[in-house]
Amino acid sequence: MKVYVLLYDVGKDSEGIHSLELQGKTVVLMFEDKDDAERYCGLLEAQDFPSPTIENIDRNEIESFCQEAGYQPRFVETGFIPHTEEERFSLVPPQLNRDTSQWNEAGKPSNPSEINKGDLDDIKKRLEGLL
C-alpha cells in the first residue's frame, strides 16, 4: 500500500522527513489521502514552516525506516476524526515548530531563539483564518 509522507530537501544530503514530537516520541505521519497531506502542508506553510514535498511511498518502506530510526509511524486514514488532543496533531500541526537544521550533534539548537507571546498570537490568528 502506498502512503503520502512529507519530505524536505528531496534528493539532497539534507533530505529529511516531517515528524512531530509527542510525549517524548518522534512521530512520522503517513497519509492515506493526498488531499489530507496537501491540507497539512498548507497549515505548515501558514505557520511559516518550510514547505515540504508530498511523496507517495510504500507504507512498508516508511514503517521500516521508522523502526530503524526509532520513530513511531502514524497512519492517518481518509476521513480520520481525532478523539484526543494528541490525535489532533495528525490533522493540524502543533503551534510551535522546532527547526532542527541548525542543531548540533548533542541534539540541541546551536542558536536557540526565544519565542515571545506576540509570535504565538500571530500564529494562532493565521491558523484561525484557515478555518
Image: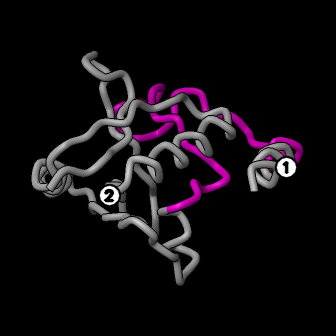
Return the x and y of residue 40 as percentages of the image width and height.
Answer: 53, 48
**Residue at 52% of width from left, 76% of height from top?**
82
**Residue at 80% of width from left, 55% of height from top?**
128
Q: Is residue 83 above or below residue 101?
A: below
Q: Residue 10 versus residue 110: which sits nearer the camera?
A: 10
- The N terminus lies in quadrant: bottom left
Classify 10 Å Cα crowding around label 2: few (below 14), some (14-19), many (20 and above).
many
Q: In this view, which residue lies farthest toward the bottom?
A: 83
Q: Quadrant of residue 50?
A: top right
Name which residue type carries label 1.
Lys
Q: Quadrant of residue 27?
A: bottom left
Return the x and y of residue 20 as percentages of the image width and height.
Answer: 45, 54
Name which residue type carries label 2.
Glu
**Residue at 40% of width from left, 43% of height from top?**
18
Q: Is residue 62 above or below residue 8?
A: below
Magenta stretch? 91-120
Location of mark 1 (residue):
125
Location of mark 2 (residue):
32
Secondary element at tag 1: helix
- The C terminus lies in quadrant: bottom right
Dominant SS type (magenta)? loop
Relative side of 25 to 99, left or right: left
